[in-house]
Amino acid sequence: MRNSTKNSFLLSFFFFASLLPLILSGGVWHQPKISFLAYATGLISLYVLALKKESPLPSLSQILLIAFVLRLAFCTYPISDDVNRYAWEGMMAAKGMNPYVEAPAEYASQFSHDPIFQGINHKEVSTIYPPVAMLIFSAISWIFYSLESFRLFFLLCDMGIIFLLSRLLAFRKLPPQWVILYAWNPLILLYGVGEAHIDILHLFFVALCLLRYEEKKEAQAFFWLGSAVMTKYLSIILLPYLFFSSHKKNALFFFLPFFSAFLYFEPAMLQGLNKFSGEMSYNDFFARAWRNLLGQGTEYRLAMLTFCALGLIAILYKFHQQRMTGMALSWRWLILCLPTIHPWYLIPIIFFLALSPSLPWMVFSITIGFSFWNLHAFAQTGIWQELDWVWWAVYLPFLLAYLGMGARRCFAKNPKLINSIQEKIW
């Protein structure tokens, strides 16, 4: 017991010490080597600490307090330029503009002195964010038009996610200390509150949906899932897991948040999303293979959508009775099929790791930190480019972890196979 306490203390020391360079970095792109070492050390320490069976950890109230303090510390981290778009589009939508058909570039002369407008990337593209997200952007910008108001809002959402996750762990009789896999995770701290990405708001709705479903409040679960979809369309993949195990009449509540689309409806309201998904790519996996094979036209998009859908259907068929496992696997498959995979896209992955741990995805959450070097190259040259070695560094350990896990399961089911291999080798 004494050794276990000592080991836990050392792991905690390494974890909290690793966060300091990230907080003070001024952006992980400035010194990618130091930032990556700190990031990887923090994640490895956290994963071992959380999953170690005899690891003494603080109470839930102490975990929440530490999580809140860590989030306050990361409020000094440079905010993402995406938040400029959240704030400006929210402000303009509150004034009656339709951000789905009017791109920021159309207002360049009118807002030439607005630093938030100047910070928007891809000004020629209209918004890609769904209507519920736009309504929330509008409310925040109407109250206080600033980037920090969005960070504060996402911080509160993130604390809500931690509380909801702790309740989900209790409902599913999983170890309560697994909440720190999300609550203290450096990826969440960097990109959830530090850079303040919309994925936090989206995940809050997803977590609320899952908890309400566990509480047998199906109508509310469907409503919150609909809100999640209208905040980020990707969460539509979770709908079948609720639909096939619920009273069908409750599914009607899923569509209530969709009425928000009528506030902005135009025939071309998805033009920004189509441009983003069809023409832009970064750090992708399966999509890269299909693009190299078919080019970047209609055939590629159709093949990729079909490939992704078939995988999701196969997972649903096998795990429809193991809802949480199926949802986690579906989200992991979806991520691998996306044409763009930024580190903050893993925010829901981290959430599901606490409910359904996976070694390969823990490895992936670490190795995606190699993307710091891509950011560093952009900061140095002003040219966005993907370094080939970074892609291999991100994905090779992840694939090896999957192969290792598969081999271990194979040998566990076939112990005679090990003896046979050893006889052949010797």
Image (cartoon, rainbow, N blue to C red):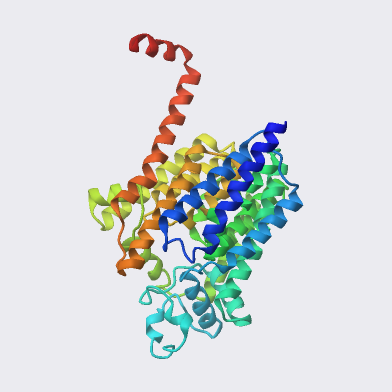
Quarter-wise, where is residue 45 in the image? top right
Q: Which residue is drawn at 36% across and 41% down?
A: 396
Looking at the image, can residue 15 be seen?
Answer: yes
Whole-percent x, y for residue 224 in the image: 63, 58
The answer to which image quadrant residue 73 occupies is bottom right
Q: Position of residue 48 (x, y in %)?
A: 58, 39
For the residue pair 81 and 206, the one nearer the viewer reads as 81
Q: In this view, does 317 lie to the left or right of 384?
A: right
- Locate the C terminus by quadrant: top left
Q: Is residue 144 left or right of residue 278?
A: right
In front of the other: 22 or 109: 22
Determine whether 124 is above or below 15 in the image.
Answer: below
| Location of residue 372 in the rendering, given as x and y in whole percent from the top left corner | 41, 57
* In this view, 387 is above or below 311: below
Q: Position of residue 52 (x, y in %)?
A: 63, 35
181 relative position to 277: left or right? right
Which quarter of the figure is the N terminus placed in?
A: top right
Say which of 45 and 139 sits in front: 45
